[in-house]
Amino acid sequence: MRFLPWQKKKKENQALIKKNEGQVLSSKPKPEAITHWQKEQFLKEFNDREEVFFLELAQRSISKGYPVCRDLYFFCYFSTLRFRFLSQVGHDARFSYVYAWGLKDLNDQISFYEKKLEKWKS
């Protein structure tokens, strides 16, 4: 149903405890789940060695207390891309600038998702 600007949908009052149901709602939001698209991306993009690195990193992260969520996926994904980036043999001098900035961007993304995971840590 679509509302016009003067017809606003009334918001339900969300209390932490619903009186009629007796359920306690969590005040802390839940992390987003991993989607089917991300599972397909994992299978398509990585070779066997990178898949093993990704899965070992995910297992270590889960044992540290991080939840299985989209942020964990991207943390492991960018860490695996950094692993791929560092394992490339024969860096050409012409691409050293691109290599340095690419590595910096990957490290920034990894630290961003690691900070987000620290917030979700149980």
Image: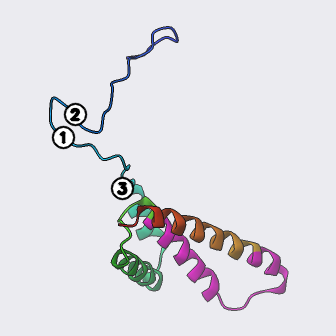
Other residues around mark 3 within 10 Å, as few (<14) / some (14–19) / many (≥20): few
Q: Nearer the viewer, residue 47 or 122?
A: 122
Give the amino acid type for the residue marked by disc 3 in the picture. Ala
Q: Residue at x 65, y 69 (%)?
A: 108
Other residues around mark 1 within 10 Å, as few (<14) / some (14–19) / many (≥20): few
Give the amino acid type for the residue marked by disc 2 in the picture. Lys
Report the magenta residues as a range.
Answer: 72-100
SS for dot 2: loop
Residue under circle 2? Answer: 18
| Residue 82, position as x, y percentages in the image | 60, 78
Question: Is 83 within the magenta?
Answer: yes
The span from disc 2 to disc 1 (Cα, nearest Å) is 6 Å
In-image side of 120 versus 106 (left or right):
left
Dot 2 or dot 3, earlier in sequence: 2
SS for dot 3: loop
Q: Farthest residue toward the left?
A: 21
